[in-house]
């Protein structure tokens, strides 16, 4: 993101006061026709004052008022932002909030709730007109529930007027994902896809190729389950997948199921036929996906059903898992110099799928603004 610093400069004062300094307190006399002598005086605010005085140059003491900093445009304003608990989303807001305040004067107050409560908390606030929050950071797929009732501000005019935003530089999918019926209601903070990560330091010595199908994934996970994978003498896990309820685990079953139920592409839908809302889950393809998802639990930590994405990331980057599936965060975490002490190398690839086809599940997080209440 671009940050522009504005410095308020105090005005330079050009003084035309003429003072005298003689043996007697008689003021100096200004003679317009006399040959002028220029006296240069440095003032505390680095202003240069020049006086035109007749006769002998004189020492002149000049005091200029100090520069006064202009107040920032939004000084004294507090912006309440609602999002969910955890380092994945809330921490960057909390860390960069002070930077925003220095630039604008507005104080950013980040309010967090459990991920399971975020949707209902935001909806209750807007639907009741409580308006306790000035902005929300949530999943853009929720926009279809918030935009039609008029709860969110239409950001389209703001985006069109802000050339620095470079809206055309955002991938078309994510522009559309943050829009409803041609109007933009949120700005994507990220755009990523689920990716399977595997340990090259495990697969290569064992002469095992990276998985190309979900059967490969299960086979590799089974091979390394119970082995000590980071040299600490403790048995580790073949697979680590976030499965905690009421968090973000629904993305994982979607990624497992997508290649089975979308053999002809995403237009086939996922859970329902978009034309008549016929359920698409009662079939052999979705049944197979659920079987794969269930079997991965056999090769994971004993408490995997209660692990969130932050937990599984920590397990993988500390060398305790042979495989995991996540967004792009694993890659940057795994190359951190401190983290690499416990993990030799990691590599990433797209989620495996039957018959060597694959598809990722896109996701994004976005901020949205409540629509201002009409003026009485």
Image (cartoon, grey):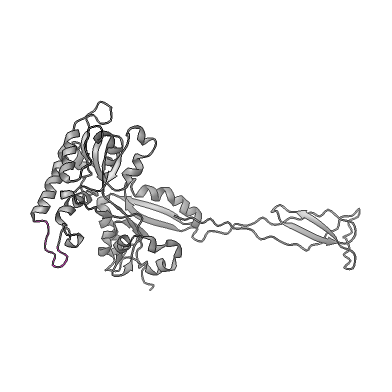
In magenta stretch: residue 62: no
x then y, percent, for residue 21: 86, 55
Residue 16, compared with residue 63, is above or below; it is below
In magenta stretch: residue 276: yes
Asked if one can make out residue 256 in the rendered structure from this viewpoint, the answer is yes
Most common secondary structure along the magenta stretch: loop
Residue positioned 22% across, 51% down in the render: 251
Residue 149, compared with residue 86, is above or below; it is below
Residue positioned 31% across, 70% down in the render: 182
Q: Nearer the viewer, residue 267 or 74?
A: 267
Residue positioned 42% across, 62% down in the render: 166
Residue 242, compared with residue 177, is above or below; it is above
Asked if one can make out residue 132 in the rendered structure from this viewpoint, the answer is no
Give the magenta range: 273-282
x then y, percent, for residue 86: 32, 46
Residue 218, located in which quarter of the rendered image?
A: top left
Q: Residue most toward the top?
A: 233
């Amino acid at each position: 993101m671009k940050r522009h610093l504005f410095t308020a400069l105090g005005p330079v004062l050009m003084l035309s006061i003429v003072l005298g300094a003689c043996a007697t307190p008689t003021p100096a006399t200004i003679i317009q026709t006399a040959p002028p002598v220029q006296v240069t005086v440095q003032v505390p605010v680095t202003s240069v004052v020049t006086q035109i005085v007749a006769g002998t140059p004189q020492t002149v003491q000049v005091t200029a008022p100090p520069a006064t900093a202009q107040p920032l445009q939004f000084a004294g304003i507090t912006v309440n932002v609602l999002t969910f608990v955890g380092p994945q989303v809330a921490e960057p807001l909390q860390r960069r909030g002070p930077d925003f305040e220095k630039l604008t004067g507005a104080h950013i107050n980040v309010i967090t709730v459990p991920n399971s409560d975020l949707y209902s908390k935001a909806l209750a606030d807007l639907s009741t007109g409580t308006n306790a929050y000035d902005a929300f950071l949530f999943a853009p797929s929720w926009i279809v529930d918030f935009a039609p009732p008029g709860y969110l501000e239409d950001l389209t005019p703001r985006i069109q007027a802000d050339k620095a935003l470079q809206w055309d530089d955002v991938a078309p999918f994510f522009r559309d994902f943050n829009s409803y019926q041609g109007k933009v209601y949120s700005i994507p903070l990220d755009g990523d896809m689920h990716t399977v990560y595997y340990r090259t330091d495990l697969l290569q010595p064992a002469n095992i190729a990276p998985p190309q199908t979900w059967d490969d994934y299960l086979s590799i996970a089974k091979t390394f389950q119970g082995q000590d994978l980071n040299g600490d003498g403790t048995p580790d896990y073949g697979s680590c997948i976030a499965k905690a309820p009421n968090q973000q685990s629904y993305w994982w079953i979607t990624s497992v199921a997508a290649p089975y139920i979308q053999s002809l592409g995403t237009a086939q839908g996922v859970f329902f036929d978009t034309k008549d809302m016929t359920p698409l889950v009662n079939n052999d393809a979705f049944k197979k996906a659920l079987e794969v998802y269930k079997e991965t639990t056999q090769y994971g930590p004993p408490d995997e059903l209660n692990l969130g994405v932050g937990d599984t990331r920590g397990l993988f980057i500390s060398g305790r898992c042979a495989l995991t599936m996540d967004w792009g965060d694993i890659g940057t975490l795994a190359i951190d110099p401190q983290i690499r002490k416990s993990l030799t190398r990691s590599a990433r690839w797209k989620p495996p799928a039957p018959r060597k086809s694959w598809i990722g599940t896109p996701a994004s997080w976005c901020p949205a603004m409540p629509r201002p209440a009409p003026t009485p």
